[in-house]
Amino acid sequence: MRTRFQLGLDDLRQRLLRMGGLAEQAVDRARQAYVDRDLIRCQMVLEGESQINMAEREIDEAAFDLLAMQQPMAVDLRFILAVTKINADLERVGDQAVNIAERVMDMVELPQAELPVDIARMGTAVSAMVRRALESFIEGKVELAQAVLEMDNVVDRMRDDAFIQLVKTMNERPDVVRQALDALLVARNLERVADHATNIAEDVIFWVQGSDVRHNVPAEPSAGSAGQAAPTPGH
Amino acid sequence: MRTRFQLGLDDLRQRLLRMGGLAEQAVDRARQAYVDRDLIRCQMVLEGESQINMAEREIDEAAFDLLAMQQPMAVDLRFILAVTKINADLERVGDQAVNIAERVMDMVELPQAELPVDIARMGTAVSAMVRRALESFIEGKVELAQAVLEMDNVVDRMRDDAFIQLVKTMNERPDVVRQALDALLVARNLERVADHATNIAEDVIFWVQGSDVRHNVPAEPSAGSAGQAAPTPGH
């Protein structure tokens, strides 16, 4: 039988996954809004922000209640702290999606310009990073988290390329400076989403490896998790 | 007599203040580096980053140890969680300072340009926000934290002005597009520092008001903080 505390942990995990889904959806919508110059999707991203902010607060409160409920085992404690950190990063992923939507709204006012940057591809890579980071959390797998860290280098290169090409465009074509600037800022926002996915992956590694790395933590065993040497992602 | 737990809380507070000092110093140096086109200060910012990252990790570990040590009172729990959040924001303030330093290093390679933006003033405002946010934490004062939230609006306006003026410059003067872009990105980085200061202020409010707002949290009293209705910043 699962204790109230364990059920609370399950609930916390479920909430964070829903939050992750919202953040991922926001990035996908923002990318699609850029590609299709679609103001309706921009609006959806803006409206989704308050939902994400509310989810963030609820997760923080749930984590707080769990910590207040009983003396958690070290492994559960690490899990709960990782959740609060991942939570903050997901909320900021949502903020970046809002920033992108605002750029797109600026862009749509201007004549369409052919630009030397593949935002769609970069957005797809970044969404994959967020999804992979959440998977590494669900499965508690360090390998998946490591893969996210490697993907971050690829996205950084894409951003650098976009930067170089778009600055060149701005120099050569004064008529599309503002469009190029919008694209450059979107590329930067996507890079920041990738950074948040990287933070999440690092938090997963902290959570999964922590219990092996640190033996000097005095913690009383709690029912159901006594004697655990490693986290049990499914509990 | 102070318990080991209370001494741990004192230590955690001290560590966070040192971390705050490092982050604030990094922003000041980056701003000064921009103003003086000073590569040595840029280098100092880059070298300071690993110190900040190390401090972040140590604070997280100390917070973890405290949570594992005993069942904290609700008010102490909120304090510890606020510390971990503020900690993450301070680390990202350091990242922004690094980004600014990198922009300055790019800028110094280019001919100096007269630009319609007062980065020095914006940087001073942003540094003040970080300092004020840390003060609100030290003193546990919601009013100080509220003042930070108001300053954020001022910085946002400065950023918007900078944006409009610099885009105009880029359109009119192709010869200084890259310098204007560097300045624009620095303004954006400063705005992000302001956002982190705002996050910190919100965390202080969460910490200070939390114990008043939430009465339904079951927590055993710990020595020295039993019966507290409000946080005692000096404990």
Image (cartoon, coloured by chain):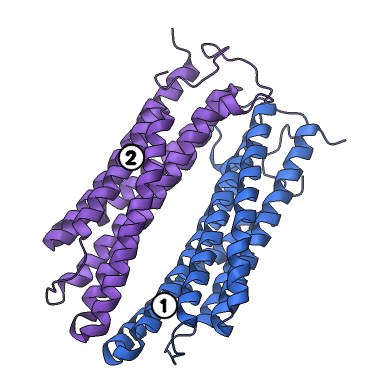
Chain colours: A blue, B purple
Counting other residues with Cα less than 10 Å from the Cα at mark 2, is it few (<14), some (14-19), or many (20 or more)? many
Q: Chain of mark 1?
A: A
**Looking at numbered disc 1 in the image, what kind of residue is underneath it?**
Asp
Across and down, in percent, residue B53 comes to 37, 48
Judge left or right: residue B91 versus residue A39.
left
Q: Are marks 1 and 2 in contact (CB under 8 Å)?
A: no
**Relative height, residue A232 to residue A165 (above, below):** above
Where residue B20 is drawn, which disc sits there?
Answer: 2
Whether residue A190 is visible to the viewer of this picture, yes or no, is yes
Q: Is residue B202 above or below residue A183?
A: above
Residue under the image location 66 percent in, 61 percent down: A22
| Relative depth, front residue between B118 and B161 | B161
Q: Residues within 10 Å of mark 1 (few under 14, many from 20)?
A: many
Q: Residue at position x 54%, y 42% from top?
A: A213
In the picture, measured across the screen, residue A187 lies left or right of residue A144, that is left
The residue that label 1 is drawn on is A182
Q: Quadrant of residue B39?
A: bottom left
* Residue at 65% over, 17% down: B220
**Which structural element holds mark 1?**
helix
- Residue A5: x, y in percent? 75, 33
Q: Quadrant of the N terminus of chain B?
A: top left
Left or right of B153, for residue A204: right
In the picture shown, does residue B137 fall above or below A28? above
Q: Quadrant of residue B54?
A: top left
For marks 1 and 2, give the one nearer the viewer.
1
Q: Which mark is residue A231?
A: none
Q: CA distance from mark 1 to mark 2?
A: 33 Å
Q: Say if A27 sits above or below B176 in the image.
A: above
Quick one: which residue is furthest to the right in this view? Answer: A1
Q: Mark 2: which secondary structure? A: helix
Q: The C terminus of chain B appears in which quarter of the rendering?
A: top left
